[in-house]
Image (cartoon, helix red, strand yellow):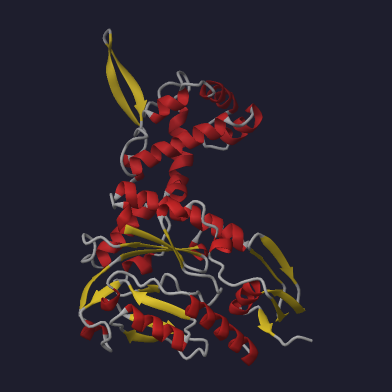
Amino acid sequence: MNALTWNFLVSKFKEYYIESSLEAPPGFVSREWGFLFFDDSGMRRHKSFFSRGELVDYVRAMVPRHVYHSAAYYQRPGAPTMKEKIWQGADLIFDLDADHLRNAPKSYGKMLELVKKETQKLLTFLLSDFGFREEKLSVVFSGGRGYHIHIRDPRIFALGGDERREIVDYLTGRGLDIERLRFKVSISGDVGAEKVRALRCQSENSPGWGGRFNEAVVRFAEEIRNLDEKNAVKKLTKIKNIGDVRAVEFYMRIKSDRVLDDIRSGNLDSLKGVQDIWKFVINHYLADQFVEVLGGETDEPVTADVRRLIRCPGSLHGGSGLRVTPLSIRDLEDFDPLHDAVVFGDESIPLEILKPFNTQMRGQSYHLVEGPTELPACVAVFLMARGVAEARTKL
C-alpha cells in the first residue's frame, strides 16, 4: 500500500467514524477491545472503555482498520494477561464465512448469497432445535464474506470450550448415528393370521435431525417427480441395486398426489410393490449426503473459543470498506450486502488497477483490467482495501 492509498483510506474511514457511531455491544465495559491499524503495526488489544463516548473518541482519534471486542465478559478486561482479566462468561458466537463453504462460487455476489442461505439455515437450528428466543440472537454481516451470530442468553454464558464444541457437533451432524434415522419396518396390525409389515421413517414434525431426515426423503421424491421419465430413470438407476424396470415403476408410482403427504407423515409404504426401493435410496444415496446438505455450517474454533475477539457492529471492515452491519432476523431475508453495507458515495476517484479484477457494487458489475481508471468512491475504497488498486493523483 503506497502513501497516497494509505492517506486516502485513513481519511475515508475517519470521515465515516466522525459521521457515524459504533454500536457498543451489551456489557461493553466488561469486554476486552482490540484494534488493527493501517500501518500494519500488529493488534493492539487488552483495551477497555468505561463509557461509549470514550470508545467512540478513541476510534475517531486513532482511525483503526479493524475494530474487535471480546465475546467474553471479564472482571478486569483491560488487564495485560488473560489470567489477570478474570473470565466471567462469554456470548455464544457463530462465524459463517464463504471460505469455509463447500463449492462456494467465485463471484463475490453469488458467494454472499450462498453464505446468507447457510446463515438462515443455522438460525433455524438455533431457534427450533435449541429453543433460543429471537430476542437473544443478534445477526451481523461481517463486512467481508459472511455473517456472525451472537447469542446472549445467560444459560450459555458459563459454557466452556468442550460444551461449545458439542453444540457445533450437533449443528454439523458430526458423529450423527445415521442408523437411528433410517427407515424401519413396523408391524401395523393383523390381517387374519398374518402380520402386516410397513415401512416407516420419522415424520416431518419430528424434532431435530429426525425431521431433517424426513425433509431429505421428501426432497428426493420431489426431485424425481419433477423429472421426465428418461431423466428420472437415469438418476434412479445410478443408485446401487435399482434396475431399469423397477426404476420406471417407482417413477410412475411416485407421481401420485398423495405420496408426498404419506412421506411427510412418515409412511414410506404407499408405493405398493416398489416400496423396497426406498432402502436402496436411503442406504446408498441419501445417507451419504443428507447431513452435508441439511447440516449447519460454522467455524468451530470461533464458537469453541471463550476468549475470542469478534468484529464490532457498526465498524468498517478494513479489507473491504463495507460496514459490519447488525441485522434483525427479519431483516436478513432482504439484506443485500453490496448495497446495504456500502457507506461511501459515488464521487469519482482516480486509481490504478494492479491486476484484473471483477466485482459488483450497488447493482453494477465492474470488469477491471490493469491500468489507470476512475471509479465511484465506494468501489475505489473496496478495491484499495482488497489490495487490487492504488490511489493516484488526477492526470
Residue in the image at 58% along x and 62% along y:
339
Residue in the image at 59% along x and 72% along y:
344
- Which quarter shows the N terminus? bottom right
Toward the right, the furthest residue is 395
Q: Is residue 329 placed above or below 372 in the rendered structure?
A: above
Residue in the image at 29% along x and 71% along y:
306
What is the x, y in percent for residue 350? Answer: 72, 81
What is the x, y in percent for residue 369? Answer: 76, 73
The residue nearer to you, when weighing 53 against 108, is 53
The residue nearer to you, when weighing 121 against 296, is 121
What is the x, y in percent for residue 394? Answer: 75, 86
Q: Look at the image and tell me whether residue 105 can be seen.
A: no
- Which quarter shows the C terminus? bottom right
Would residue 87 be found to the left or right of residue 13 on screen? Answer: left
- Which quadrant of the structure image shows residue 140? bottom left
Toward the front, the furthest residue is 19
The residue nearer to you, when weighing 221 against 48, is 48
Number of marks drawn: 0
Q: Is residue 309 placed above or below 284 in the rendered structure?
A: below
The residue nearer to you, when weighing 242 against 226, is 226
Residue in the image at 40% along x and 85% along y:
57
What is the x, y in percent for residue 126? Answer: 34, 52
Q: Is residue 334 placed above or below 78 in the rendered structure?
A: above
Q: Look at the image and tell me whether residue 255 can be seen.
A: yes
